[in-house]
Amino acid sequence: LESAMQAGAIFASKLLSPEDAKTKAPVVGRMNDIKFKYAVKPGQTVEHTVTFKERMAGAYLFSAKTRCDGKLAASFEFIVTMANLGNE
């Protein structure tokens, strides 16, 4: 699931203005509606589908589905916010 959230964080960071991109970094704030359907074992390859749903007051809502061998392994929603880097 972490790699799906990293994809969402990269997407959200691309929505920042060039100035904000210098002072802010994406952080996952929350996960919701987590459903595990299939156990993924070491050595198996997963495929993520991450969908941007909406922006709400500086937070970005995404949904994600993780598949392994064509089977749905997990689905969830998550929120990415932007943290100040402290270099302003």
Image (cartoon, helix red, strand yellow):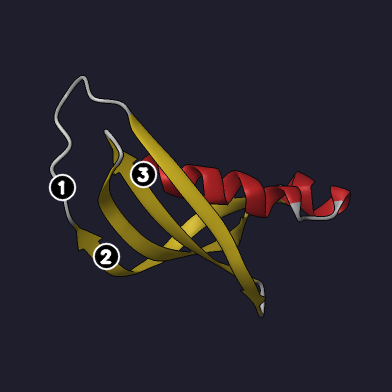
| Residue 71 x %, y % | 26, 44
In the displayed structure, 76 sits above or below 44; it is below
Q: Which mark is residue 2?
A: 3
Horizontally, is 11 left or right of 69 in the view? right
Q: Say which residue label 1 marks.
A: 38
Q: Residues within 10 Å of mark 3 (few under 14, many from 20)?
A: few
**Label 2: which secondary element:** strand
Q: Nearer the viewer, mark 1 or mark 3?
A: 1
Q: Which mark is residue 34?
A: 2
At 30% from the left and 39% from the top, the residue drawn is: 70
Q: Residue furthest front?
A: 70
| Residue 10 x %, y % | 61, 44
Q: Earlier in the sequence, mark 1 or mark 3?
A: 3
Kind of residue at badge 3: Glu
C-alpha distance separating marks 1 and 2: 13 Å
Q: Residues within 10 Å of mark 1 (few under 14, many from 20)?
A: few
Q: Residues within 10 Å of mark 2 (few under 14, many from 20)?
A: some
| Residue 42 x %, y % | 16, 24
Kind of residue at badge 1: Tyr
At 34% from the left and 46% from the top, the residue drawn is: 66
Q: Nearer the viewer, residue 67 or 61?
A: 67
Kind of residue at badge 2: Ile
**Label 3: which secondary element:** helix
